[in-house]
Amino acid sequence: MRAKPASARSDAEAPAIRTFSIAGHQFVAPKAAPGLHLVATPIGNLGDITLRALETLAGVDIISCEDTRITRRLTERFAIECVLKPYHEHNAAAVRPKILEQLAQGASIALVSDAGTPLISDPGFKLVREVCQAGHQVIALPGPSSVLAALSVAALPTDRFFFEGFLPAKETARRTRLAELARIDATLVMFEAGSRIQDSLRDLAAVIGNRDAAICRELTKLHEDVRRLPLSKLAETAETLETRGEFVLVVAPPAADAKVMSSSDLDDLLLASLKESSVKDSVARAVELSGRPRREIYARALELAGQHRARANNGDD
């Protein structure tokens, strides 16, 4: 009789002998200890799975995953028979109590994301917090991470980095957030969707300035591509960028010798420039010389230009 596929097994049908296979060789896995096991899974290349992860996935009672279809590709690749249960942002509130109940009964449960390390831009945080509060064991199994993979190949400083996750989808909110990120003295790491990558690159160049950066697309996959250029060049060539796939953006920190112009000096610069140039040109020059975010400078330039017009209308000039 053929074994039922993992998706068809009930909670009471865990295999008597837990096994996994690598290149046709079968290995026996011990039953995993009770608790929640946070298992990092490949971000693209299934060969990046760790031996410990395979042993744990084969040894737990249940695998909680974002998408059972995606996780099933992994379990089928390594001939792992286990119960797969969905846990994602849309059902998390309803499923968490069930997981806590199962853990209270001594179950061993693996939490995986669709790709990479759980809790990095996925809904696992609340589950882990409640599992800890309930006194159950939480075990981390480190492994693949697109954040660390991108940092490794970006050829940018890695001694200090700030992970932003996904930028806001709308332009105004995205530029506002980028103005805040521009002040952080660390390498920036961001996720971005292919549908927004071109707009985000242009906003990065406009708001953060011409720092060195890297676009990492489809890391560990067949069509992996890494572009390392200043943000201005990446923005100029954004239209030629292949937008299919998963993207990680890495942006260098501010230059060590970068000096931020004082508010009074910025006002003097803008006032002098506005007498001879447009707001747009004045802002562009101030961005280059001041070390301040474009959004902040643009708002101040509009304010100063408005004050100048008001004085002119009142005959003060």
Image: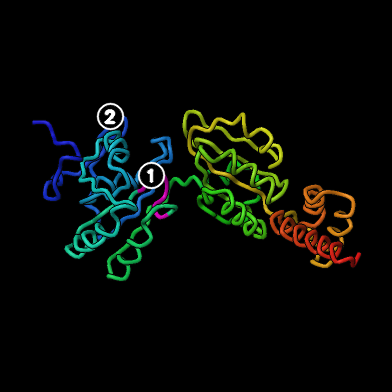
Task: Report the amino acid beneath label 1.
Answer: Thr
Segment tinted magenta in the rendering: 113-119
Tell me which amino acid carries mark 2: Gly
Mark 1 residue element: loop
Which quadrant holds the N terminus?
top left
Quadrant housing residue 239: top right
The residue indicated by pointer 1 is 41
Say few, some or many: other residues with alpha carbon within 10 Å of mark 2 (under 14 / 14 to 19 / 20 or more). Answer: few
Residue under the image location 54 percent in, 49 percent down = 170
| Of residues 109 and 259, the one drawn nearer to the viewer in this rendering | 259
Q: Main secondary structure of the magenta part?
A: loop
- Secondary element under disc 2, as helix, strand or loop, is loop
Mark 1 or 2: the one toward you: 1
Contact, CB < 8 Å: mark 1 with mark 2? Answer: no
Vertical relation: 256 (above or below) 221: below
Mark 2, residue position:
24
